[in-house]
């Protein structure tokens, strides 16, 4: 079983900044190629994006009242079971906090575009 989440962010979040943020969040493998990035955590969480963005529209159904042109869209996949002592949800929390601390980008992290788990606006990082 796997869970698919999506990170949608404005142009303030560059691939370079995202790379540093996932490193600070504890990714053990990070590959950057052009405008694409792949990161993996020991929990099994994987984050990936490529250099082709299909549309600047936010796909998340609940935008939590924020609006921005999407410049970076990442797929976050959580595939179980997690190794003992590891938590993909804790890694997700670390990623959201690290991005929020690394730059002022507005972003949303949603579960299959249906449920918003994290969002960053002008007042900071939030969870429902």
Image (cartoon, rainbow, N blue to C red):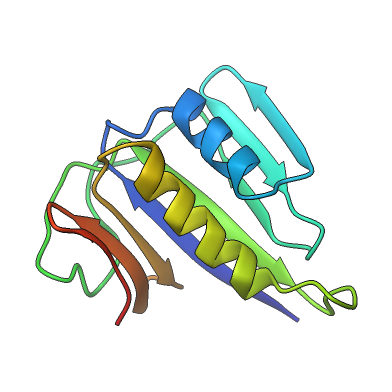
Question: Residue 24's spot in the image, x, y percent?
Answer: 60, 42
Question: Residue 6's spot in the image, x, y percent?
Answer: 46, 60
Residue 121 quadrant: bottom left
| Residue found farthest to the right | 84
Which quadrant: the N terminus? bottom right
Residue 128 quadrant: bottom left
Instruction: Tell me if 13 is positioned left or right of 47 in this view.
Output: left
At x 15%, y 46%, the residue is 68
- Report the label total: 0
At x 12%, y 52%, the residue is 122
At x 60%, y 33%, the residue is 37
Question: Residue 114's spot in the image, x, y percent?
Answer: 35, 79
At x 89%, y 73%, the residue is 83
Q: Nearer the viewer, residue 78 or 102?
A: 102
Instruction: Tell me if 87 is positioned left or right of 126 in this view.
Output: right
Q: Is residue 69 above or below residue 2?
A: above
Q: Nearer the viewer, residue 34 or 14?
A: 14
Q: Is residue 34 above or below residue 88?
A: above
Q: Nearer the viewer, residue 84 or 15?
A: 84
Q: Is residue 122 above or below residue 1?
A: above
Question: Residue 86's spot in the image, x, y percent?
Answer: 79, 72
Instruction: Tell me if 36 is positioned left or right of 40 in this view.
Output: left
């Amino acid at each position: 079983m796997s869970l698919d989440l999506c990170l949608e962010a404005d142009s303030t979040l560059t691939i370079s900044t995202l790379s540093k943020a996932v490193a600070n969040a504890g990714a053990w493998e990070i590959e950057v190629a052009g405008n694409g990035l792949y990161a993996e955590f020991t929990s099994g969480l994987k984050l990936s994006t490529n250099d082709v963005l299909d549309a600047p529209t936010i796909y998340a159904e609940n935008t939590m009242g924020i609006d921005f042109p999407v410049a970076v869209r990442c797929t976050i996949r959580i595939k179980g079971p997690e190794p003992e002592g590891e938590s993909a949800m804790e890694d997700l929390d670390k990623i959201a906090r690290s991005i929020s601390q690394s730059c002022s980008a507005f972003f949303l992290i949603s579960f299959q575009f249906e449920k918003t788990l994290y969002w960053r606006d002008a007042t900071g990082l939030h969870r429902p």
